[in-house]
Image: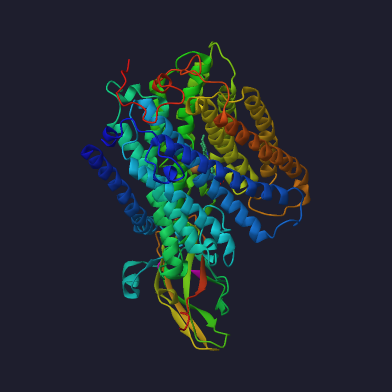
Amino acid sequence: MSTATADHHGPARGLMRWVTTTNHKDIGSLYLLFALIMFLIGGAMAMVIRAELFQPGLQLVDPQFFNSMTTVHALLMIFGAVMPAFTGLANWLIPMQIGAPDMALPRLNNFSFWLLPFAFTMLLSTFFMNGGGPASGWTLYPPLSLQMDAGFPFMIFAIHLAGISSIMGSINVIVTILNMRAPGMTLMKMPLFVWTWLITAYLLIATMPVLAGAVTMLLTDKFAGTSFFSAAGGGDPVMYQHIFWFFGHPEVYILILPAFGIVSAILPTFARKPLFGYSSMVYATASIAFLSFIVWAHHMFTVGMPVVGELFFMYATMMIAVPTGVKVFNWISTMWRGSMTFETPMLFAVGFIIMFTIGGFSGLMLSIAPADFQYHDTYFVVAHFHYVLVTGAIYSIMAAVYYWLPKWTGHMYDERLGKLHFWISTISVNVLFFPQHFLGLAGMPRRIPDYSVQFADWNMISSLGGFVFGLSQLMFVWIIFKAIRGGRKATDQVWEGAQGLEWTLSSPPPYHSFNQPPTVR
Amino acid sequence: MTGHKTTFFKIALISVAMFGFGYLLVPLYDVFCEITGLNGKTGQIDATQATAVYQPDLTRTITVQFIANHNAAMPWEFAPAVNRLQVHPGKLYTTHYIAQNQTGNDMTAQAVPSVAPTAASRYFDKTECFCFSQQHLKAGARKQMPLQFVIDPKIPDRIQTVTLAYSLFDVTQPAN
Ligand code: HEM
Ligand SMILES: [Cu+2]
């Protein structure tokens, strides 16, 4: 074991500590910092989008640049912010929650992280090449995506690198969970965050390679004369959509399952009651993961499928709402008659439940195939996935940061500012995204820099909400910064109702978590 | 540590296999489209075989419409000789499309067919088609491109009109 020789040494000093580190906490912090930077850059792009859409007409940027903003905003947020943030949380928490000294494969861990800065520098560098950044939408449908100029291979390789990084990261998570649990920590005793990450990791190793295959086919179509997706050579562009969404739908669950784990950790703490229906939560997570592989064509209802296909994918999609509903009801039952308090992590968790459920409902509306012909590629879809991703995935990450920050840094964050951050964000995010439902139902298409005047009012309101939401995230950065620098000392347990192994360690925890395996009750 | 290694390789194998599966989806997709006739993929049979197998059904008449599309920047003139034919299922028909290369360069084109409604494509068999191979035209040249087809008499009764559309793609290799 690598830790046997590493008994009592602390971290190395200076900058090289971060480059060469194999410590799960250091790497966790690196991932979280990286995710935050990507969140801010991606957020700045969103501000460009909302500024252009503030009024009808073309005023600030040219349409090609606008389209590359929507494309790169999505790529950064999905692959650069949400996924690395979850991986960072996994690094910090999984060893502490299962009673292990570190991750199973520490050097691989270092490698997985350091691929990311290169991947995203490469992606962003395409903006300075001939023809600019990718502008085909994050789904990279051919033939449009093949029209990208000099930056095309750089974008594809960036996706390859990010994909390899998350596959490596997932393998590490699986090996750690399977092999390094403290004695007595049976699978069905694991905290739900560990469970959801185990299942997410399996989704990742099963689907990221399919994405890698799809973009490799794009690459060879452009440069090596293959015609996977070119009709003239006997291929078919619609096939790309099938392959992409075979990855793409499980991917959206990769972006939400760890969030389910986080919320399942936070609610019992602040409701001071154990989680309702632990094992049904585990089974629900597993069935969501399974179902996510057979619903991909709900993204393609309008490509011309036969009626049987439409019906199959419609019913399969609706079926996902059942295990998702099980989860939501379990959370509500956990809170039922609990003695609840509303510290910042709890506010974000409750906000998550309410607003994620709104996103789930709009998802159900979209899953109705005949209705989707109307909604597809409109702002209604944009509203749907921002409710599940911003007020879902991102809210859970913020909840997690507030919840575990005192454990990580040893300092309490500023509770007053945290609550303010929650309320400003929640009001503005709804002003930002709720009107987009109306815009979509009225027929405003997505990914368009200009629109007809009847959409003007709601767009202006949405943009105003967007600016406030964007700015209020600077508060988040400030609160974290303040807590790292200092603040009221946190106790080991931090929260009165907190349960689990990580709370038995000191705050901040020792550099190597459990050199002696803890006893699990 | 060896325990970790075996687990690592087992799981890494899954991702390598899934990379392969991504590519496997390509032939699977084609097989699936062929079996179901989705995607407007039409059948291809031999002319002698067609007359031997199918009994012409003179009691039914089906309208076949012909459409020509140009892909993106394809500069050729491209049109069907007739816009529609009234046909009996089981009988062999011949018609043609006309193409002219109006540019100053020799060019090569590939036509890609599509049949609507999708349900009809399984019953639409071609014995001869300019879409079976690439078509070359010298600068300024003009050509009649033949098409011979038969409709399977088993085609469902509710189908009274079949539309056959061709998209013409420029596949000229850039001269190096
Ligand atoms: C009850 C659960 C859900 C259902 C029934 C559902 C259904 C759908 C449907 C039918 C579409 C396609 C809409 C269209 O393009 O016309 C869609 C799009 C989308 N969904 Fe969901 N969804 C659900 C949950 C989620 C979750 C949990 C996430 C992510 C955390 C998510 C992320 C997305 C994204 C990103 C898109 C848009 C992809 C794109 O075209 O760019 N959905 N959803
Ligand atoms: Cu989906």
Magenta run includes residue A84: no
Q: What residue appears at the point 53 percent right and 63 percent down from the top-left corner?
A: A151
Q: What residue appears at the point 44 percent right and 63 percent down from the top-left corner?
A: A219
Q: Position of residue A171 (x, y in %)?
A: 34, 41
Q: Position of residue A306 (x, y in %)?
A: 47, 50
Q: Is residue A96 left or right of residue A474?
A: left
* Outermost residue to the left: B2
Q: Is residue B21 left or right of residue A506?
A: left
**Would residue A246 be visible to someone looking at this image?**
no
Q: What residue appears at the point 43 percent right and 37 percent down from the top-left corner?
A: A26
Q: Which range is magenta? A: B86-90
**Would residue A171 be visible to someone looking at this image?**
yes
Front-lying residue, A333 or A177: A177
Q: Is residue B44 left or right of residue A386?
A: left
Establish if A518 lies above or below B80: above
Q: Position of residue A122 (x, y in %)?
A: 50, 57
Tell me the chief SS of the magenta region. Answer: loop
Establish if A483 lies above or below A470: above
Q: What residue appears at the point 65 percent right and 34 percent down from the top-left corner?
A: A475
Establish if B17 lies above or below A424: below
Front-lying residue, B172 or A204: A204
The colour mode here is rainbow
Q: Position of residue A390 (x, y in %)?
A: 58, 37
Establish if A238 lies above or below A373: below
Q: Quadrant of the C terminus of chain A?
A: top left
* Outermost residue to the front: A13
Q: Quadrant of the N terminus of chain A?
A: top left
